[in-house]
Image (cartoon, rainbow, N blue to C red):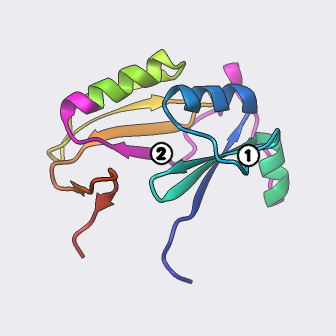
């Protein structure tokens, strides 16, 4: 298998609500989107939104119970990340997520590894880290370039 990540699919409680949240953050739905799934181009990968129950059924796994407001109970063991060009951009992105209906989980601050980061959760509780990493280079498209 070639080492490649093509899509990240989030199981959501309410597809219309989730789509509106991500569109409020500036994501633009692709033409392949429909009433059952939404696809957003996301800098070389695709962010997909799919009904949580339908996603569990498709993968033939049990759907875990949800807590209040459709958020998953406990920590799911995964976080999505958005790398920013500056600390100010981190603060702005977190504020934008909260204004769009997300929940601030951890305010931005200096990290133990020398960067600056904070976390928000989307309306379904999916964690996003927003970080400025002074050791990463971002290309013109905002993609992380790792030294190999």
Look at the image and say whether residue 70 sits in the magenta stretch: yes
Please check the rendered image and state whether residue 95 is part of the magenta-colored stretch, yes or no: no
Most foreground residue, 137 or 77: 137
Q: Which residue is drawn at 21% across and 28% down?
A: 88
Position in image of residue 1 (x %, y %): 56, 83
Residue ID for mark 1: 33
What secondary structure is found at the residue carrying circle 1? loop
Q: Nearer the viewer, residue 100 or 12?
A: 100
Bin the neighbour count of mark 1 within 10 Å (Cα to Cα): few under 14, some 14-19, many 20 and up.
few
From the top left corner, tell me how far across and down residue 110 is, in percent. 18, 34
Quadrant containing the C terminus in the rendered view: bottom left
Segment colored magenta: 60-89
Cβ atoms under marks 2 and 1 closer than 8 Å? no
Position in image of residue 21 (x %, y %): 59, 26
Residue at the front extreme, as displayed:
31
Q: Residue furthest bottom?
A: 1
Q: Secondary structure of the magenta portion, mostly?
A: loop
Query: If you read the primary sequence from the N terminus, does the residue marked by circle 2 or circle 1 appear first?
Result: 1
Please state if 56 lies on the left or on the right of 71 as rendered.
right
Does any portion of residue 43 appear in the rendered image?
yes
**Is 73 left, or right, of 148 in this rendering?**
right
In the image, residue 103 sits, relative to residue 34, either above or below, namely above
Residue closer to the observer: 81 or 89:
89
> Could you give the CA–CA distance between mark 2 and mark 1, rounded to whole angstroms?
24 Å
- Which residue carries the number 2 mark? 79
Residue drawn where x is 31% and y is 57% of the image: 144
Give residue 105's position: percent from left, percent from top: 43, 25
From this view, report whether residue 67 is shown above or below residue 42. above
Residue at the spot x=49%, y=29% of the render? 25
> At 56% across and 37% down in the image, what residue appears?
126
Badge 2 marks a residue whose secondary structure is loop
């Amino acid at each position: 298998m070639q080492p490649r990540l093509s899509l990240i699919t989030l199981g959501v409680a309410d597809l219309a609500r989730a789509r509106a949240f991500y569109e409020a953050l500036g994501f633009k739905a692709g033409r392949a989107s429909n009433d059952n799934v939404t696809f957003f181009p996301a800098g070389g990968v695709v962010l997909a939104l799919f009904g949580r129950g339908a996603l569990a059924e498709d993968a033939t796994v049990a759907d875990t119970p949800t807590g209040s407001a459709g958020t998953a109970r406990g920590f799911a063991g995964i976080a999505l990340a958005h790398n920013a060009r500056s600390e100010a951009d981190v603060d702005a992105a977190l504020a934008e997520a909260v204004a769009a209906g997300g929940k601030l989980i951890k305010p931005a601050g200096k990290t133990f590894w020398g960067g600056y980061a904070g976390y928000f959760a989307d309306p379904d509780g999916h964690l996003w880290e927003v970080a400025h990493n002074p050791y990463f280079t971002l290309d013109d498209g905002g993609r992380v370039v790792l030294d190999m």
